[in-house]
Amino acid sequence: MLFRIKSALLACASIIALNACTSDMEFKDTNVTPVKSLYEPNDNKDVPLQASATAAVFFEWESAKAEDGGAPLYEVVFDKAGGDFSNPIYKVLSDGNGARNYATISHKDLNKVGQMAGIESGETGEIQWSVVASRGVITTPVSIKRSLTITRLLGFAEVPSQLFFAGDAIDEATDVTVISPELDVFEAVVKLKGGKAFKMSSERGRAEGLTFYIDGNRIKEGDGDGTVAEDGVYRINLDFSIASAKLQKIEKVEFFFSADNEVKFELPYVGNGVYSGVGSVDFHQESWGRDERYKLLMTYGDGSKTMWGADNGIDSRPNGAGADDAYWNAGEYDITQWENKWKLDGKYDHNVPFRATLYLNEARRHHFIEDAGDAPAPEEPGELTAPATLTLSGDATEGGNLTAKKLDDNTFEIFTEIKGGKAFRAGDFHVEDGKLVAGAKDITLADDGIYWMIFDFAKAEFTAKKITKMSVMDCWHDHGSAVLDLNYIGNGEWEATGKPHDSSRNTDDRYKFVMEVDGQLQQWGCVKDYDKRPEELETIPADYYDMKTVATDQWNDKWKYNGDMLDQELHVKVILHDTYTHVMELAK
């Protein structure tokens, strides 16, 4: 393939070690010989995949040769059994960013290949692999291939980053908060109606989300429904790495006073994983003083029992610790009288009433002890009527009235710059302790920054996450990495001019965006994966460039550059207000 660069100097500089300049400053993709021998793994090798993060398969092949004497770049390509590799289902860059004639490919990646090849979770099937080489844009054809038999993991190749419960079985006044205590694992305590249906989704109120349901002790993907036999509060643990589901009915939670080795009162279920009750105790007199140690006893429907106690080895009274203090953190332990205990404040001796509350549907599972007279029973957030529109205004904003995007009947979202310490207002609502409350009052955030703010009227919750970077993501480079940072220009928009595609590191044409939010990476991808360059479509769909948050993945939910954009200076703009979309065009 021939293409002309107007500046001779730029042409030679951009193709050093990759292409050959001709005398009239035209250049072409350097010829590379196809990979002719595959060494490892052996043909028809059987690989039962393992859930371990370090499990991998070593691939190796004979080196290709380039006519300019340089080193080729390699990709391992996969296809379904019987496929001709004309449209590989998955690609993996070789080790050393494509420079090595070998690749260490994780079992997790092979599990994705199996899913794309149509092999069901936990089933055994055949895939094909080969290697292609290049020195520029055009890759060599597949000249030799091998088969690999894999047994897929019982889990899922794509694990949702968040999870929501829905269905007639959910006997809760507001949305149930689902926590993720460890990678690929979700857990929630929720009240369910027996015989009624429920399911889980990766998106709340958005039809395009992944859906899952519980079938016995398995998680399954699709439109099925799960049920429980009887009404009750259930602790649901979902491990997507092995597709396992564990449902335990919680019979009760009680206050256990270690000194008397007995329970003193019950903590009734309030909702959304919260148990709270009022009671009193008389500290136990010992030779060394008054014994005030306690824990919380949980009894499951099958009669088994566990204790929730201190997870930090403390041996002191709270001494005025606030509700957010680590003193109150809770972990689940086997039944003992003394280990992992807390101590009551001395003011509750001699049967002074107090309230004990256990919070299970929070990332920081904890409890709290407070005066009974000053502590009304925790209630589910009162229902707020979501407004038709939500407008931000005030000295802290970028200026003028800013309209938040309405995601569904109860949720608004906005990306904007806020001045720390200054006030803004959100229509006729304000925020108290992270909760949305009716009434037009000032809201402040501590630090200057670009914020992703969500107003959830169904849960009466407000969240503000700080955005520190928005970048173009190269799907191939380093298995997906930021290659061009965008500058925030206001009103939820970022833009930059630069060269996001560089064939010296990447011969692929796929890209996404990645946002750094509160120290975590959030990918943004297409709303519909057309899997074609714009120039390959007869008509570019109106939603081609539209974008949404997507799960962390190297290849899914991507766009493709037009052929004339490769190795060129591009103007890139991301727009996160009204319709979430982006612009990708040649720089003027």
Image: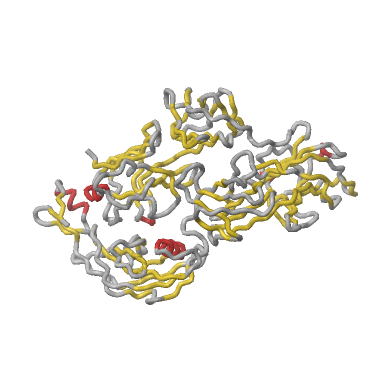
What residue appears at the point 65 percent right and 37 percent down from the top-left corner? 380
What residue appears at the point 27 percent right and 55 percent down from the top-left corner? 504
What residue appears at the point 36 percent right and 50 percent down from the top-left corner? 529
Picture coordinates of residue 308, whole percent (x, y): 72, 51
Corner quadrant of residue 56: bottom left
User: 416 above or below 121?
Assistant: above
The image quadrant where one finds the N terminus is: bottom left
Residue 567, visible in the rendered structure: no
Side of 102 where 252 appears, left or right: right
What residue appears at the point 80 percent right and 48 percent down from the top-left corner? 293
Picture coordinates of residue 302, whole percent (x, y): 73, 58
Picture coordinates of residue 365, whole percent (x, y): 65, 47
Q: Nearer the viewer, residue 474 or 551?
A: 551
Picture coordinates of residue 564, whole percent (x, y): 21, 48
In the rendered view, how is the structure colored? Answer: secondary structure
The image quadrant where one finds the C terminus is: top left
Residue 188, visible in the rendered structure: yes
Side of 304 where 411 appears, left or right: left
The residue at the far front in this view is 195
Q: Nearer the viewer, residue 58 or 525?
A: 525
Corner quadrant of residue 516: top left
**Number of numbered discs:** 0
